Image (spheres, rainbow, N blue to C red):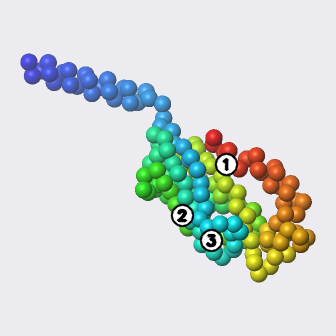
């Protein structure tokens, strides 16, 4: 009787292992990104970037970038379902902030100003040539506006 029970348990364990190996890879989803503070965001000020995560791969590492440049290296999501880092922009203009986990990404566009130099691109004075609402900025914003928040959706 004990041999039969042992064989049954071994058979069930083998079947369970086959089902787990044959299952599709766990997916992760970056649901949303938020930035602390309110507009206008300014250079040399610290903000907190937070990503809400879900999916079966919720424990996968999270990568943060600013205009494609790494911000933090890989981060373990903690608490589970969230990832946050401190971000301190040093340049004015539009910043595309992206959180990636597994194959999922989400991007948010944030305009950063330099209050000490309002005539520079992204400087915060739309009436000054080269300000954050110039025609080149509007064209880029229009082009990127369709991408913002839709990556990985």
Residue at the spot 85% in from the left edge and 75% down from the top edge: 119
Local crowd at mark 2 within 10 Å, few (<14), some, or many (≥20)?
Answer: few
Compare residues 21 and 27 and report the one nearer the observer.
27
34 shown above or below 58? below
Q: Is residue 4 left or right of residue 44?
A: left
The image shows residue 147 at horizontal and vertical percentages of 73, 47
Q: Mark 3 or 1, which is nearer the eye?
A: 1
Residue at the spot 14% in from the left edge and 18% down from the top edge: 4
Which residue is labeled 2 in the image? 85
User: Which SS class for mark 2?
Assistant: strand
104 shown above or below 132? above
Instruction: Tell me how far mark 1 sits from mark 2, CA to CA.
Output: 19 Å
Residue at the spot 89% in from the left edge and 70% down from the top edge: 127
The C terminus, quarter of image: top right
The image shows residue 22 at horizontal and vertical percentages of 43, 27
Q: Which mark is residue 88?
A: 3
46 shown above or below 100? below
The N terminus, quarter of image: top left
């Amino acid at each position: 009787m004990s041999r039969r029970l042992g064989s049954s348990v071994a058979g069930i364990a083998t079947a369970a292992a086959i089902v787990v190996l044959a299952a599709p890879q766990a997916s992760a989803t970056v649901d949303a990104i938020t930035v602390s503070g309110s507009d206008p965001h300014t250079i040399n000020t610290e903000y907190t970037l937070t990503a809400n995560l879900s999916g079966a791969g919720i424990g996968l590492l999270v990568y943060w970038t600013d205009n494609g440049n790494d911000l933090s290296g890989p981060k373990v999501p903690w608490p589970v379902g969230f990832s946050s880092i401190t971000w301190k922009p040093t340049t004015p203009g539009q910043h595309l902030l992206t959180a990636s986990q597994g194959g999922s990404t989400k991007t948010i566009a944030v305009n950063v100003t330099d209050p000490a130099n309002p005539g520079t691109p992204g400087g915060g004075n739309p009436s000054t040539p080269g300000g954050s609402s110039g025609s080149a900025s509007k064209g880029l914003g229009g082009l990127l506006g369709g991408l913002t928040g839709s990556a990985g959706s």
